[in-house]
Structures are given as structure tokens and as C-alpha cells.
Amino acid sequence: MKYKYLSLGINSIKHYKMKPTHLLTGLFLYLTMFVCTINSRAQTHKIAIVSVADTTFIHQHVGLTIFTNFTDTLPINFSIVNHLEKRLQAYLNPGYSVKVVQLPDSVLRAKNGFFNQARTKKIKQWIKNSKDLYDFVIVIDNMELAENYRPMRNNTSGVFSRISYFSYYSTISFFGYHTSSLKPLDYYHQGGEFTSHIENFKLPEDKRSFTPEMMTVIYDGFKRYLDKRVEYFLAKSYLLPQDKIDAIKADNGNAK
């Protein structure tokens, strides 16, 4: 667009080179359009991404009786938070100025209790104090689960099985805010695919002894599951329309 304005300004100068008044008019037109272009770029919305999420990765199994229920912590070979940050950046960077920001220790050390939302209050105060730096802040955090998802444990991610059923899930979600007003970017956090059935995967006989090959399948599928959660947030919070998300995925090879 800038080059279009430059061409227009130069053509005006060439056409009116024998007329000083018109020469000044052409220069003024070019400079005005150039400044508008610069201002438009300067007005790009700025987004900060911060994280306070618990990334404990587990396998939770619900058997036929309480005696066959178990919860195992599983090793994970990648950072869930880093994966989510990179996906958000991949989608948002074309239209926004995006930065991953480390929250102060005073905020990270605060804990939410049953009657005390100390950390949430500190995060919101930090967001309010950042209104001159960012237009939006996206907080990666754990959400409270609805009643129908209570078998899953709060502040966890991983795989859930019931008898022979096997699925991915994560309590990690995205909380977006306007820094100027602290108004949240509302959407239904547990919508989309909060749980995602794992197709063509046979659980081991004891339901818990996964081979390295099985774990690789679980890791790869869980990343794809997280990607869908990112897309759901961006579309439902109206930060990006679905057709734009699809176009970026196509351009970036599914954002990988």
C-alpha cells in the first residue's frame, strides 16, 4: 500500500512539474498518505501472553469399581505452555503485535484459595498497570471444571479413560482481557472439544503400562488437541475469524 501512495505522489509531481502550486499539492498528497500508512501500522493492537498454568500431565482411569480407579502422573517430552504460546503467536502475529511476557515473582508466588483469589487479583492489577503497553492480555491458566467433568482432576492435563474409552483433556484455558477496562473476552471455556476421543488406540491389559511407542502416539495427538483448543479460543473470543484461522493454517502448513 505504501508503494501505491509513493507512485501516486511521484506521478503527481511529474504531471505538474511546470506548475509550482500543483507541485506542492502533489507533495502534500503523497506525504499525507504516507503518514496515514505509518499511523495505521503504529495503531496495530498489542497483545501480551502470560502464563500461570499448572501443567501436571496425568492418566486418570475410572474402572468398574472404586478399587480399579487410579491416577498416574505421566512424563511428558515437551512444554505444554511453550507449545500454546507458539501456537498463539503463529495465529496472532500476522494481525497483531504479540509478545510473551514473564509475570513478576510477586504475582507468580500468590496462590488462589477457596475463599481468597489472591493471584487472580494480582494478575488483574498487573493487567491494569499494563494498559499503556498492551491493548489485550491473554492469560494461560487452569479453569474450574463444570459438574459433568468432575471425574477429571482440577489443574491437570492428560488422558482420561473409563473402562475402554480413552480421550484427551486439559483444564488449561485462555483468559483474555482488554487492558483499558479489564473487560474479559467472553466465551465458553469448556466448549469446542474439551475432551477429544483417541481413535484406534487400544489400552494395555492393565490400563496403565504404556510402551514408548504408545507414549509417542499420545504426545503427538495431545499436541493436535491443544491446537484445536487454541483455535476455539481465538474464534470464539473474536480475536480472529474462523476463515482467517483456516487461511493461516493453510499458509503455515497447519501452523507447524
Image (cartoon, rainbow, N blue to C red):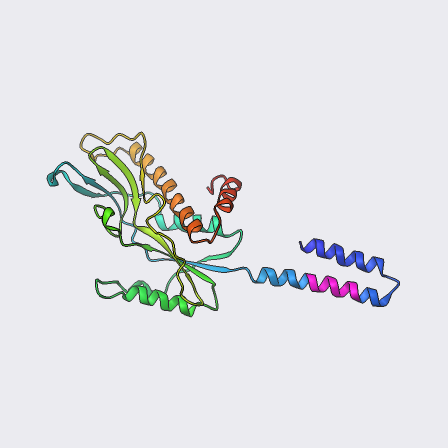
Q: Quadrant of residue 222?
A: top left
> Quick check: is 255 in the magenta stretch?
no
Q: Nearer the viewer, residue 73 or 171?
A: 171
Task: Residue 255: give x, y in percent of width and height.
Answer: 47, 43
Q: Magenta region, mostly helix, strand or loop?
A: helix
Q: Quadrant of residue 9?
A: bottom right
In this rendering, does residue 106 appear at all?
Answer: no
Residue occupying the point 17% across, 41% down: 70
In this rendering, does residue 121 appear at all?
Answer: yes
Left or right, residue 169 beside residue 206: right
Q: Nearer the viewer, residue 57 or 174?
A: 174
- Start and end of the magenta stretch? 25-33
Residue occupying the point 44% across, 49% down: 235
Task: Residue 123: give x, y in percent of width and height.
Answer: 35, 65
Task: Residue 187: give x, y in percent of width and height.
Answer: 38, 53
Task: Residue 59: give x, y in percent of width and height.
Answer: 24, 41
Residue at the right extreme, as displayed = 18
Reply above or below: 187 against 117: above
Q: Nearer the viewer, residue 36 or 87?
A: 36
> Quick check: is 31 in the magenta stretch?
yes
Reply above or below: 190 against 161: below
Number of numbered markers: 0
Reply above or below: 209 against 190: above
